[in-house]
Each structure stands twice: as C-alpha cells, then as structure tokens.
Image (spheres, rainbow, N blue to C red):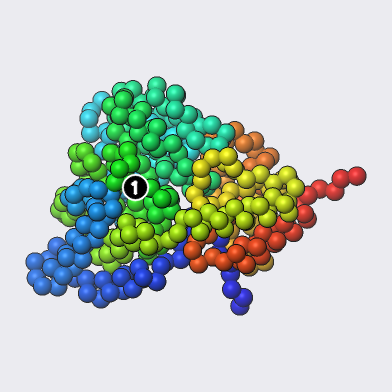
Amino acid sequence: MRPVIYLDHNAANPPDPRLVAVFRAALEAGWANPSSPHGPGRRARALVEAAREQVAALLGVAPGQVTFAASGTEALNQALAAATTSGGRPRVVASAVEHPAVLEPLAALAAAGRVDAALAPVDPAGRVLVEPLADLARGAALVALIAAQNETGVVQPLDTVGRVCAAAGAPLLVDASQALGRLPRDWARAPWDLLVVSGHKLRAPRGAAALVHRGAPPPPLVRGGPQELGRRAGTEDVAAIAALGAACDLVRRGELLDPAALLALRERLEARLLEAVPGLVVVGHDAERLPQTVALLVPDGDSEALLAGLDLAGVAASAGAACSSGSLVRSHVLDAMGVDEARARGRLRLSFGPETTWEELATAADALAGLARRSRPCRR
C-alpha cells in the first residue's frame, strides 16, 4: 500500500509524538477516577490540575478559570447556553461564517425562544463586517466569533471586534480551535471573554477541550456530579486532558509548530497551483489566512469527483464542508461570502502540517492540475 499524502489537517491532525507519549503516560498513571480520595485517584487528579495550570498559563488566567470538556463543540454549546441565564430573550450575535458548533446550537436556542439570534454579515473574503456587527452588538448578551475559519483559513479582525464588543458591553466568545498554535499571537493579551480550545486541533489525541472564561464562570451544560468545579459533570478523561495541557505548554514555548515555515509552503503551493490551473481561485487570497490552509475554487470542477480523483492518486483532501449521505452539502461559508453555487461546486480545501514535505505538496498539486484539466468542458 502506497503512503497517503494527508492534506486534511483542519479536520484532524496526526497527533504529535510528544503528545502521544504524554497521553500514554497519563493513561497508565492516571487510570483511576480523579474524584476519588485515595492515592491512585489523587495521582489522576494531579494530572488534571497540572494540565489546567498549563492551559491557564498560555491564556493568562487563573487555573480556576479553565473548564475541561470532551470536545470543542461541547464547550461552545456550554458558552452559548450561558448567555440564556440572564432571563428574558437575550440577543446573541454570531458571524455568518461560524462553525456549525456555534450556528446549530444557536439556531436551536432561538427556535426554543431562549435567545434572539442575529448573524453578522461578512465581506467577500469572509471577514466580518464591523459596522453591522457594532449595531448588532449593542445590548447583546454575547457575540461569538471564530478566530480563523475552518473551511477557508481566513483570520477574523479579532482586535477590532474586541474593541467593538467592549464599547457595546457585549461579552466576546472566541472559537480559537483552528487558530491557537497556528497564528503567532499572544492569546493572553487578545480580546476575549470566553475562549474555546480543542486538543485534537493542537495535535493532541482526541477527547478533551477547554472553555476558558475571564468573567463569571459558565453554568454547567452537562449536569450530574460536581466535577470541573461544578461546571461540567462526568468523570474527566485524564489522558486526553493531560495531552491538551502539554499541547498548550508547547504552544506557549513556541515549540508545537513553525507558522513561518508553514506559510512558506503554502505560498509555494498556491503559486504552483495558480500556474498549473487556469482560472483557479484561491479563496480569501487578499486576506490574512491560516498558514497551512488553502481553499480553492476549481473552474468547472465538481468537488466529489475531484476528491475521488485525488483519493485514487493517494491524496487525502477535503471540500471544507461536512458530507451527508455521500453528498457534499452546500457551504454556508461560501454562501455568506457571495460565492455562487456554480463556482462553489468546485471547492476544495488542502490543509497540511509540519511533517508535510514540499515534494508531497507538489505531487498533490500536479494531481489536482491533471484532474482540473480533465474536468474542463471541450471548447470549440
């Protein structure tokens, strides 16, 4: 079996060997219930609390301001539900290009009459429009913003949005799942009131995320026992939490990955693709983007056919959107950016990591160029 060129890192990263080692060690040493008072339980608890301190150190908060969850989706759901505790029907604002982990629970809360949901429009590059957002943020109980869009890699103007929210008195929830570790930024000084980070996006094994708060702690979404300082019931996944903490420590020390090296690879890849495929569009080309993400619109292309062809060529890629019953659904992100359905039909996302070589990217680019040539209709 030939090796696969894996270019779907935004969906899931291959775990970093250092973090796999942490996970395995914590699985062996922290197998006991961390709420138990005996020695094995205390050892498990010590691993959880050490990870809490590592997350807190990266984000500039006290350890008690970190709540562990099983996934970024759960943590985002908890943050959104917290906005309903003020009574009435508070307004919650989100950008139109948020991850479904925000848009779906927000729609459900609105349908249940618990919030008044409002979506802020974006520009053609997918960046939230500040003036409409400022109008919507006035009197809002919460504003949700994805720091870097998972489909396109486009980075949002977080500093500007932070000033808007501060002026409006609206707490800001930042989904940093894709951005943290990949953008050279001091998150301890960034504007946010609630922030979500996901372990498997930081090259740790799946199973843990963190909801971090600067203001009042969020009430529990999952109820039962008193775990996580009473903010999230259920026995903690000690190994996954330990790996998440170690990943945050690597980010804090600048040792998880090299964004500049990834950016250099991305620029070479885009140049090769644009030369090889006439009419190819790099989505958000004039915006700041994640250094390892390339979102493309292939002219006259069909995402399913292109992905199948790449798969046969040994390249694992994505269309940047979820699949349903074998068919790619329309991208709400491209819709919000004003991309028409015909052009969006040829969307692809290539995302890579520090172990990806230029030779692999060049091979993938050549394979895509060949598929794109075959997909173009004959012109007489």
Check the image and name the residue furthest to the left. 37
Residue 59 located left or right of residue 379: left
Judge whether residue 65 can be spotted in this image: yes
Q: Quadrant of the C terminus?
A: top right
Mark 1: few/some/many CA within 10 Å (<14, 14-19, 20+): few
Q: Is 86 drawn above or below residue 13 in the view shown?
A: above
Q: Residue at x 58, y 48 (%)?
A: 295
Q: Residue at x 46, y 66 (%)?
A: 14
Circle 1 SS class: loop
Q: Quadrant of the N terminus?
A: bottom right
Judge whether residue 309 can be spotted in this image: no
Q: Is 174 drawn above or below residue 229 in the view shown?
A: above
Residue 337, percent across and down? 56, 35
* Occupied quadrant, residue 114: top left
* Occupied quadrant, residue 78: top left
Residue 286 located left or right of residue 172: right
Residue 119 located left or right of residue 253: right
Residue denoted by label 1 = 186
Figure label count: 1
Residue 224, percent across and down? 19, 52
Q: Residue at x 28, y 74 (%)?
A: 25
Nearest the eye: 363 or 252: 252
Kind of residue at disc 1: Asp
Residue 310, percent across and down? 65, 61
Check the image and name the residue furthest to the right. 380
Residue 33, percent across and down? 18, 67
